[in-house]
Image (cartoon, helix red, strand yellow):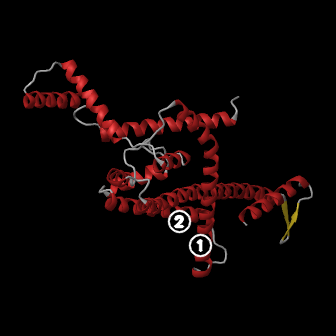
Amino acid sequence: MCHPLVKKSLWRAALLYIYGFIGGCVFVVIERKPESNRQLYSRLAGQLRRNFTTQFNISINDSDFKLFMDQAFDVVTIGNKPDWSIFYGLSFAMTSLTTVGYGHITPETPLGQIFTVIYCLVGLPICMIFLKTLGEIIAKAVKRLVRFFETIILGKKRPRRLKTKSFVVTFMLMICTLCLGGVTQVYLEGWTFVEGIYAYFATLSTIGYGDYIPGWKTVRIADKQSGIDNNIDLWIVVSILALPGLAGLCVVSGVLNALVDAFDELKIHFYVRKECVKCETKTSTKHEGLHEEGNLFIEDPNKSIDQKIGVTLVEERIRSATL
């Protein structure tokens, strides 16, 4: 016999793979282009070579031109990489500790890579505890707000499904945070609203694809103009802009805490309904043990004491679960 935990893990693994396969197929349908990247590369490379040879009136073979393109690509890539400074070091540390990991700046030396591993092993639990604590504060604050709204404003004496309603409110708060971040990036980075929401979702969910980094374009422009470490005004602006991101991470943590509480509440309600069905069944069995004498129902003395106690225990468990 397969252990129930192993069976549950297999079912969940199958669900994950099926969901991943469906998502992959959907992304292929949406994102696949008529011209493949290899074909596009060949076409653009040929066009660039023709323009290059025509403009400079030279002839060049395929291998030399490919070597020239590789070197030009390396030059552009190095030019777009930021140099390590206090600000970029802080940016790398925070994106690592929050598990966002944009990949916009990474250590390249063996010593830096080893220190990254040790640094994150110590710092990740600290950051996770911090976010979890703030998430619990947000979840409890929303729960109190929901209870206040239902008891004081709506006048309900015993509000029901508080945890589920708190999850819905916290989730809507997260949606508002994403929309606010999207609007902010429209004005700061010149992105579209969808791109802004996509970038903030990748950040707040700590996926961190790195194709859209909120505030990165503004920082790079300021760094090229006057340097960033000595620019106090830019430090203040970036610090202020980082607050919504940190608050968003806390809101996401609050959503996860509220989701766990809501799931536990749903499990309790499911348990109560299940026990109610058992209670009704045992109650009907108990009534069958009664025989009528005139207009009175007298309990059958042959009914076992265990059955009587069992019905009473089920009723008490249901009553305690509903409180």
Of 87 and 278, the residue lying toward us: 87
> In percent of the image, x 39 and y 55: which residue is there?
215
Marked residue nearer the N-terminal end (1 or 2): 1
Q: How crowded is mark 2: few (under 14 residues within 10 Å), some or many (20 or more)?
A: some
Q: Position of residue 253 (x, y in %)?
A: 57, 56
The kind of residue on which mark 2 rests is Val
Kind of element beneath mark 1? helix
- The answer to whether 121 appears left or right of 210 in the picture is right
> In percent of the image, x 70 and y 58: which residue is there?
272
Residue 304 can be seen in this image: no
Kind of element beneath mark 2? helix
Q: Position of residue 195 (x, y in %)?
A: 34, 53
Q: Are marks 1 and 2 in contact (CB under 8 Å)?
A: yes
User: What mark, if any, has residue 145 been given in the picture?
Assistant: 1
Location of the N terminus (image quadrant): top right
Residue 310 can be seen in this image: yes
Q: How far apart are marks 1 and 2 (CA)?
A: 10 Å
Q: Name the residue under label 2.
A: 169
Of 240 and 302, the residue lying toward us: 240
> In percent of the image, x 42 and y 54: which residue is there?
200
Q: Where is residue 284 in the image (x, y as percent from the top left)?
A: 76, 58
In the depicted structure, whether residue 71 falls above or below residue 293: above
Q: How crowded is mark 1: few (under 14 residues within 10 Å), some or many (20 or more)?
A: some
- The answer to whether 39 appears left or right of 108 in the picture is left
> In percent of the image, x 60 and y 41: which residue is there?
119
- The answer to whether 208 appears left or right of 164 in the picture is left
Of 106 and 259, the residue lying toward us: 106
